[in-house]
Amino acid sequence: MAHVAGLNLVVFDIDGTLIRSVELDDTCFVRAFADVLGIEGICADWSRYENSTDSGLAREIVRRHLGREPSLEEIAMLRERCCQLLRKAQARHPGAIRAVEGAAAMLAQLTGDTPWRAAIATGSWPEAARIKLDAAGLCVDNLPCAFADRAEDRCEILRLAVAQAVQRYAPRGFQKVVYVGDGPWDVHAARRLQIAFVGMAGRQGAAPLVSAGAATVLDSFLPLHKVLAALEAARVPEETVS
């Protein structure tokens, strides 16, 4: 594929990458299953599931606990209840959902005079993602976005986001694509698609990302020149020996 000279793409995850909300998000997600389907005792270590996306987790949790596939109506009810709980939790705890330091300025800069364009690929359902982004004061409405309503597999969500970005910004392709995420599953997705990766350290620090194969891990989007340098130097994660 021919490339647009000098034009690159950076694709961001949302939870734990652009915003800090993982603890609150997990609590609301797990509570929704108890409220809608009476499912208790959910393992919230999402690395133990086949697909660590809202849609993939919902399907696997119902399979594990109820021994069947969830209906479309049940999925819709879970999505709605999760959003209700997020809104209530945000109202009770203002500031519990916040942007990662420098995220807003960086997104604004990437849509300006740089060789980079931005897109969003998140394992969150779109309604929940927008609640969290609004609470954090981040707007991505002008960016190509792919959410968990489009696919269960994170690789497919990432692939969809890149395809949207190509269509909008660079029909002949990008010179370089970098994925920025906070979980080992993000590293694995980048490796599978042979996309360069930069990690964002979460509540467990950089260690899980480094163990998964990430060569570069940031702890914020400040200063901007450091972030841009990390994007320029980013490479495809290497295979790790377990």
Image (spheres, rainbow, N blue to C red):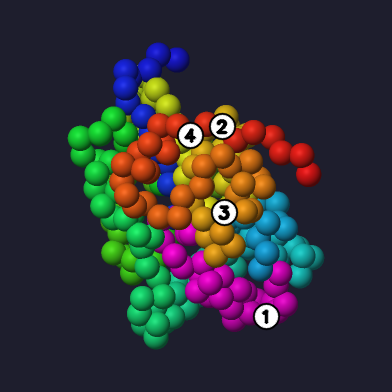
* In the foreground, 69 or 166: 166
- Label 3 SS: loop
| Residue 85 on image: x %, y % | 47, 78
Q: Closer to the camera: disc 3 or disc 2? A: 3
Q: Are marks 2 and 4 in contact (CB under 8 Å)?
A: no
Q: Are marks 4 and 3 in contact (CB under 8 Å)?
A: no
Name the outermost residue toward the top.
Answer: 2
Question: Residue at (40%, 55%) from the top-left corner?
Answer: 220
Q: Is residue 126 visible?
A: no
First-in-chain label (3 vs 2): 3
Question: Residue at (38%, 36%) from the top-left corner?
Answer: 229
First-in-chain label (1 vs 3): 1
What residue did someone put label 2 on?
A: 236
- Amino acid type assigned to the residue bearing label 4 in the image: Ala
- Label 4 SS: loop
Question: Residue at (60%, 49%) from the top-left corner?
Answer: 209
How would you rate the neighbour count of disc 4 (Cα within 10 Å): few for under 14, some for 14-19, many for 20 or more? many
What residue did someone put label 1 on?
A: 38
- Label 2 SS: loop
How would you rate the neighbour count of disc 2 (Cα within 10 Å): few for under 14, some for 14-19, many for 20 or more? many
Q: Is residue 16 visible?
A: yes
Q: Is 134 above or below relative to 198? A: below
What residue did someone put label 3 on?
A: 206
Question: Rounded to the nearest whole Å, what is the CA distance between mark 2 and mark 1?
Answer: 42 Å
> Residue 213 magenta-drawn?
no
Name the outermost residue toward the bottom.
Answer: 92
First-in-chain label (1 vs 4): 1
Q: Is 204 above or below relative to 110? A: below
First-in-chain label (2 vs 1): 1
- Residue numbers of the magenta segment: 15-43
